[in-house]
Structure formats: C-alpha cells, structure tokens
Amino acid sequence: MDNIRNFSIIAHVDHGKSTLADRLLEITETIPKRKMREQVLDSMDLERERGITIKMQPVRMIYKPPANNQQQTTDDQNHPSPEEGRGSPVVSREFILNLIDTPGHIDFSYEVSRALKAVEGSILLVDATQGIQAQTISVLNMAQEGGLVIIPVVSKIDSPLARVPEVKKEIAALLSCDESNVLEVSGRTGDGVEALLREVVHKIPPPREELSETKTFRSLIFDFQYSDHTGVIVFVRVFGGELRMGERLKFLVAKREFNPIEIGIFSPDRVRRQGLSSGEIGYIVTGIKEPGIASVGDTVAHVSDTKEPLSGYLNPKPVVWASLYPESQDEFVNLRQSLTRLKLSDSSLSFAEESSGTLGRGFRCGFLGMLHLEIVTERLKREFNIALIITSPGVTYQVTLKNGKKTSIYSAAFFPDGHEIKEVLEPWVRINVISPNRYSGSLVQILYEHEAKIEETQNFGLDRISLKAQMPLRELMRNFFDKIKSLSSGYASVSYEIADLAKADVARIDILVADEVVPAFSRMVSLRNMEEEAEAAVERLRKILPRQLFALKIQAKVNGRIVSSRSLSALRKDVTGYLYGGDITRKKKLWEKQKKGKKRMKERGRVNIPQDVFIKMMRFD
C-alpha cells in the first residue's frame, strides 16, 4: 500500500478539472496519445455538450517520477517537514495513482462528498482568470472536514487573462499557507503538471494501515452503474483484506449474498483483474438486476464477515419536486421502466407514482436541484426516447392544521385552504454570493426581492465581496441564478446548502375558468409576489385558451379573494351576413336573438379545456 495514492480533483464548475485530468492521463501514458481526446473521463453526451462533469469517474494511473527528482526526495526523506512527513517520500519507483474526477456544479455536491470518502487527499483547483468562487469554498470545506490533505493549484496560467499572483494570494489567505506552496499548472499546455504529480506522490499519504488490520475483505461503495447484461456494477474503495475471483460476497446493509462475475480497475475503461487488495479502488460486477439492493454507502464484504458495516454516506435528500407525465399514456409503463433504470445509476433520484385528472398517470420525482432536474429529464428524452410533460418544480411544505394534525405537502393541489392552516414551514437555504464590489448594491436588491436575509458581508480578495444570506428554497426556482449571472455579467458565483425549516408566508393560488376551479393550474406562491404571479398566470392562460361560444372570465383566487381577472370574448357568427338592404330593425332582431342564445349557453355550458393548454401551462420551461 505504500505505493498507492488515492486523490480527487475538486473545484468550482468550469475551473479546468476535466482538462487537468486529461493531461494527467497523457503524462502517465494511461491513454496512448493516438487515443487522446478532450474530456476523456466525461463519457456522457450531455457532459460533453454542456462542458461539465455530471458523474464522477475513477481512473487508475501508473506514475514513475523522473530520475532527476531522486536527490531532492532523498533530502526530503532525511529532513521531512511536519506537513510533508505524512506522505511517503518520493523515490524512483512506480506509484499507483487512483484519481476521482468530481463534478463542480452545486447540484452534484453529493457526488463530491462520496468521492472524498474514498481518498486521502485532494487537488484544490482555482481558475487563474476567475479566482476563488463560491463553490470553491464549499468543496474545500467538505475536504477539510474529511481530514484530507489539500494541494492548492492555480489552473489556466496560459490564459492572457490570468491573474496568477493575485489568485495565489487569495488561495494562500484561504488556506493560511505560504504562496510558494500554491502550484501553477495549465491543463491545456501541460505546464506544471509533472511537478503536480510529484507533489501528489510526496504530500498525499498512502492508505492508512489501521484500516486494513483484518484479513477479511471489506470495501465501501461510493458509486455504481447498471448494465443490461451483467446487472449492477459497484465502484468500491477497499479498506481491508483482499478479494479474489470465486469468493462469495455480501452486502452488509442489504444482507444479500452474491458471487462476483468480474473484478477489475478503471484505466479509465474497465480492466478485468483477478482481485483487489486493501487501499485500491476498483469495481465488482455483481450480476444483481433487482433495484434497491445496491446502495451508495453500503459495505461489500466477504460472506464470513460478522462485523458492523463501515461508516458510509447519508442518502441524499431531494429538495426540488416536479411531476413527470408521458405525453401519451401508452408510454406510462415505458416511463416507469426508464426511471427505474436511471435510479440504478443515480441513487439521488426518487420517484413515486401519482395520477392527475387532466394528465393521466405519471410520477412525482425528487431532485437535488434545478440542474439535476434538467439532466434527468434530458436523459429520459435522449436515452429512452420518451416525450415528457414536466410540471413546474416545487418544494415540500410542512403544514400544521388548526386541529393539530401535521402533514407534508408537495403538491399545490393538496394544499389546504387558508382558514384551516395554523402554521406552514418550508425549507430554507444558506447561500454565499461572491461578486465584484461594483455589483454589490444591485445584488442586495435582488436578494431582497427573493426574500433573503443577509447575515454577513465581507471583502474577499481584491475588489470582491462575499454576501452570506438565508432565503427560502422555493426562491431559487424563480430564475435566481440567471438573475445573478445577468446582473453581474457572469462574474458572480453562488453556492448554497440546505438549512433548517422556517415559517413560510405562502398561499395556494387557484385559477378559475368560467367560475370553476381547475385544480391542475393551482400553484404555491409567496404572499409578497402573490399579485404578480396571479397576473402572469391569468394573462398566460388568456393567450393560449381557445375562445368559446360564450364569453367567460379567467380569474386567480388566493384565500377566497379574486386578485386578478381577464375576460375572453365569445366566438360570434355573423348572423346578419346574408341580409342586404332593408330596415336596421331586421338586423337588431337577429342580434338580440343571438344575445339571448349566448346568455343561455353561458348559464348551462361548460368549458372544455384542450389537452395542449394544460401542457403549455404546466410545462417547465
């Protein structure tokens, strides 16, 4: 195990993690140059199109430090510093480097937290053109809480916009270290990558011996995939013992035994091996095709293991909910199967069947954020060819009724009337906005509009400010990120984490068509933005609802009070078109007859709302 180094790359989104990973693979000759391409570890089409990492990807590299580094490392061995002494000294021998490339977007922070459980150190990457961003701080905090060794690195030093000296000062201040400890690299040109590899070998310690005292195989699942042919493939970090083909294993939490079909490592494609030993990162093909057996954080151990499972991870809790319906009910079974398949590779996705009187049968799905919602729905469309109706996203409310009953409400259609409610609680988030100083005034205004409570303001780096605040989670869905980016010309960054529940000033808005409530159009709104939301909903429906044979009203009602109203004029036949000449009283008689007919029709008639109107009103844009 002295030759093994397990590490990850953590950074804000688009700070060059995947590009740096490409250079590491190239320098260590893990992938031949003729097969090199950009974003090697981003295997999904969506990752390549958006330029972001969605799923973390482990890879094993073999690295032999250059001979000219041997004398330097001998000196380090004889006189190790307190910090550097934690790692094995670099000598001219081969090292096994297990890298986990992690996502940078805030919605996939759960991926980062799982990756950090499987490594001993992390490369903290900061873009030389942007400096420290909000997500940089949040992922750094996760790594420090896990006791990982941090190697600070400035990336994109070849850019003409790079501010290397200023950014190094920011990093040194953040980590309370000397600027000389901050490395400089360029993932595009490869400058400084060789020195970074030597630093990884030198500073990051090998897997801890105390976790491998037992000879019984024990490993922790940090991710998994699903294959139609071989079932669930679990990604594991081995914490003790050795595994050889033919040995029977079991999930300690799920209590399910199985015989592994295949064992191997990532290089970066799966490479079959005869076994895995303590400290290594690899995969096990289980052959299990049932959902719900494998789970992130479970322990895979030898069948004879009788000890408690390893401390794993908390299951990620959905924070955003939206309903997915197939445009054709004939696709309902296909949608259920597709969601089950996605659940096998994305443990953070949750769903439950529900039905709507207007849209038929569908699923109420829970997501980690807005980007997670977009990624899942896009995968359903591309990989499974399903046309979807996606309702507007919402959050879960904890409602206490006046009779003392408490309930969780995730759909506006089930939200009780205002006179029945004693108290409503909703999830809040703690946010951190880092922006140039010149935008601070406008940022405060946007935070106020989104009901945020500013807790702390401090200068951050050169000409930058950090705003920390708390706000309702539902406000993040009102184009909050887009407004921040637009206002700051793209310079501001936002990170958030779920906070406690807090009292909610919300109400249900009902849409009435011809004096009848249409439950499918109901939604939850803030009392502060009640009139604005009502006006927008009524106006949108007025534009897309086909005209009827009688005049009707479209109204929005909140707590029994009409707050917005529009009229839709009736379709009228030209009943006097065939007349020519004569007295005007002939036309007036026909108009009066038509008027009485329209009145009788309004009293008895019902509005038949077409399916496409529901789709246009409910679809998430």
Image (cartoon, rainbow, N blue to C red):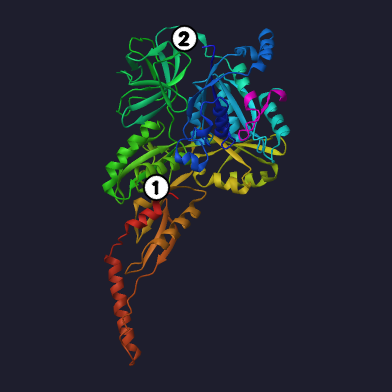
Q: Where is residue 78 in the image (x, y as percent from the top left)?
A: 68, 7
Would you identify the image quadrant in which residue 394 lies?
top left
* Residue 145 higher or lower than 583, as above or below: above
Q: Quadrant of residue 142?
A: top right
Q: Earlier in the sequence, mark 2 or mark 1?
A: 2
Q: Is residue 609 above or below residue 30?
A: below
Q: What element carries label 1?
A: loop
Task: Name which residue type carries label 1.
Answer: Thr
**Residue 496 within the magenta-colored segment of the rendering:** no
Could you classify mark 2 by the number of other residues whose Cα lies within 10 Å: few (under 14), some (14-19), or many (20 or more)?
many
| Residue 173 appears in view | yes
- As drawn, the label of residue 391 is 1
Image coordinates of residue 372 in percent, x first then y, are 45, 39
The magenta stretch is 179-195
Label placed on residue 212: 2
- Residue sitting at the far front: 34
In this orientation, does residue 401 appear?
no
Q: How crowded is mark 1: few (under 14 residues within 10 Å), some or many (20 or more)?
A: many
Q: For the point 41% across and 11% down, which residue is it?
A: 242
Depth check, front residue: 499 or 283: 283
What is the x, y in percent for residue 134?
60, 35
